Amino acid sequence: MGNPISLHDKRKLRNRKALKRKSYGKLRLTVFRSSRHIYGQIIDDVQGVTVTAASSVESNIKKQFKNCGTKEVATVVGKLIAEKAIKKGIKNVVFDRGGYIYHGRIKNLADAARESGLIF
């Protein structure tokens, strides 16, 4: 028997495959969430480097909120990642939600990034 893959990992692989097929050469805004924190990275897949990142682990965000696993924190992280990207001259990205459903904290992060100037 092979190694069983979780449903989350299947969704993540399916999503990444579709993104790579549709948007070769664009930077990718990828999201990871845990029960306590949320992370966002803009990745250049061609060079294999992370261009910029933001998360709820950063000290200025942790000081503002007692619980960093909320929608409000995801909104702040989305704005922060967009500001950092625009400072580096990045406007167009592809949104990689990973294996997560586009709902709740993931949606808030994406909407905040769009409002702050990222195009995807």
Image (spheres, rainbow, N blue to C red):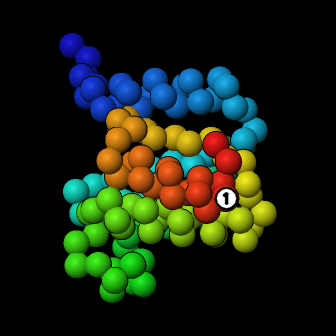
- State left or right for residue 41 relative to residue 88: left
Residue 41 location, x and y as percent? 54, 57
Residue 97, percent across and down? 45, 41
* Residue lying at the far right of the rendered structure: 89
At a point 40% along the width and 83% down the height, the residue shown is 59
The answer to whether 61 is drawn above or below residue 32 in the figure is: below
Residue sitting at x 28%, y 69%: 68
Q: Position of residue 104 (x, y in %)?
A: 32, 47
Q: How many marks?
A: 1
Q: Quadrant of residue 10?
A: top left
Residue under the image location 72 percent in, 48 percent down: 92
Q: Amino acid at mark 1?
A: Gly
**Pointer 1 residue:** 117
x, y percent for residue 27: 68, 47
Q: Is residue 69 left or right of residue 61?
A: left
Can residue 51 be seen in this snapshot? no
Say left or right for 62 vs 20: left
Residue at 45%, 55% in the rendered image:
109
Q: Is residue 96 above or below residue 87?
A: above
Residue sitting nearer the eye, 70 or 53:
70
Taking the view exactly as shown, the residue that stands out farthest to the front is 115
**50 and 76: which one is in front?**
76
Q: Secondary structure at mark 1?
A: loop
Dot 1: few (<14), some (14–19), or many (≥20) neighbours within 10 Å?
some
**Residue 84 in sight from this viewpoint:** yes
Quadrant housing residue 120: top right
In the rendered view of the protein, which quadrant contains the N terminus? top left
